[in-house]
Image (tube, helix red, strand yellow):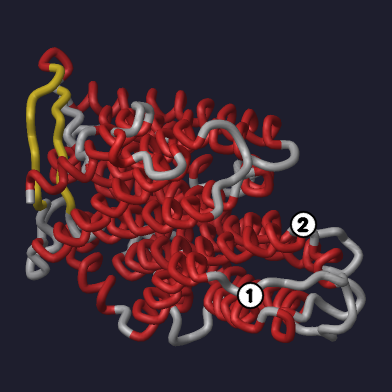
Amino acid sequence: MQFLLAFIVAAPLLGSAAALLPAPPGLKGKSPEQAVLRHGVTVTGVILAAAVALTLGFDHDAPSRIQATTDISWIQALNVRIHLGVDGISLPLLLMTALLFFLCALYSYFKLPAGPSPKAFVALLLVLESGTLATFAVLDLLLFFLAFEMVLIPMYFLIARWGGAQRQAAAWKFILYTLLGSVVMLLGLLLIGVTAGTFDMVALASDNGRELSHTTQILAVLAIGIGLAVKTPMWPLHSWLPDAHTAAPTVGSVLLAGVLLKMGTYGFVRILLPVTPDGMATFAPYLGAFAAVGIVYGSLACLVLARKGNKGDLKRLIAYSSVGHMGFVLLGIASMTPTGVNGALFANIAHGLITGLLFFLVGALKDRYGTADLDTLAGATGAALYGRAPRMGAFLAFAAVASLGLPGLAGFWGEMLALFGAFDPAEGLSRPAFLTYTAVGAFGTLLTAAYLLIVVRRVCMGDPKAGPELAVADIQRYEFAAWTPLVALTVLAGLWPAVLLGLTDPAVQKLLAGGNS
């Protein structure tokens, strides 16, 4: 188990270096480009297999215990250690990350985005995977920061070199926002580590802030929270996200929504809730307010984009939907209750699966039509996917109803538990304020249903003989292979939520209790 976790974190880096080397003569095949893309599929597939093996070997009877640990002294002067481990909170995120990277590598093998060398594309994809996996596996504050920052450069180049229109401006906006947030976050992490005398996240969580004064906790939450909120993204620090999603290639959008946004919310749960509980209690009402506004703001922005005549871009619309969905995650965290935090973690996974599927589908539509503009797709009567490409229409309708939180699918449980957590927040938090946030969030679910049903009506319905005179190919085999696992897991998590909650709940209970089971 110890070896498996270290292998999962380090192997993508080795695979990235190998991708830049010339392919061995026996593995070149007919095309060197296909050889390196095949290498990407192989490496990500091996990582996924290792993650599945780690999950099977995980002691599911003790999900609150840190397992598969590696703890080696690295920088003795600062007491920084190479400390790795997983529990019920990080294991689902680790597994979902490995799955999404494998599906993106598989999709890219058949549909590589236009851009420079495939070698560089695969190498950057694998560096990105290593950084995201490390973020969910490390248990040292400085290592967390390094892993958190490691993803910025590869994602910048994926947007800037393989993206669409306005890709340079979107890439710069992405990296400037996240870098500025990260600088502030580093100051907060250093403040905690220096004051407490350790950067070890397990020791800090067990101490539960007793070594940190109230002022120190407030400063740390403010600094670290800003950096995490930018990556989440929380309203009003979200403005980089729509541009980045609109310009990014399909797999870039899938990974940005499915994995990178989760790094911010994971930091709130893993670091701020257990290490600075008093500081979080001070800021929780404000975090809840920003979350509630983000839910409604994201939904209203989507409604505007979905309306006929507004030239709304579908990728941009789904990006704004992420602002709303991540608002539910932040609202659950702000409640500081086991119910709310479990809901936040469940919504994290549900959003990764469902929004990843949505970006895959919109990318496929853009490839077929040459545009993601909703008015162009819909024409006068609707794009009529049900008639022109029925399987793609069915996939899109499924992803939309899953995203709006239909009971029986994964999107329902996370949002419901987050609202339940806000309805009865932790002791000491203002219940009237959180009741208001609950009402606003519930209203946001209605707005979410409204814009997603408008999208389904305009894209899936209509007269197949009207609109753009263009033959639309239905789902190809490689698309079916890349999308079906996301559909299956969305249904599984919706019908059997205990698969996730059985892992997260004991770990969350222990985390909120200051390391005591």
Counting labels gives 2
- Mark 2, Cα crowd under 10 Å, few <14 / some 14-19 / many 20+, is some
Q: Horizontal placement of 472 versus 134: left or right? A: right
Using the image, determine if residue 269 lies above or below residue 199: below
Q: Position of residue 386 (x, y in %)?
A: 70, 84
Which residue in the protein does label 2 denote?
371
| Residue visible at 9% across and 52% down in the picture | 67
Q: Amino acid at mark 2?
A: Thr
Q: Position of residue 66 (x, y in %)?
A: 11, 51
Q: Quadrant of residue 223?
A: top left
89 sits left or right of 473 in the view: left
The label shown at residue 263 is none
Of residue 334 and residue 27, the one placed in the foreground of this image is 27
Quadrant in the rendering for residue 146: top left
Dot in front, 1 or 2: 1
* Gap between marks 1 and 2 measured at Cα: 17 Å
Q: Position of residue 209 (x, y in %)?
A: 22, 40
Q: Position of residue 282 (x, y in %)?
A: 41, 46
Q: Nearer the viewer, residue 16 or 2?
A: 16
- Badge number at residue 474: 1
Q: Residues within 10 Å of mark 1 (few under 14, many from 20)?
A: some
Image quadrant containing the C terminus: bottom left
Ranked by sequence position, the earlier of labels 1 and 2 is 2
**Residue 286 in view, yes or no:** no
197, 488: nearer the viewer: 488
Residue at 58% from the left image edge and 32% from the top image edge: 116
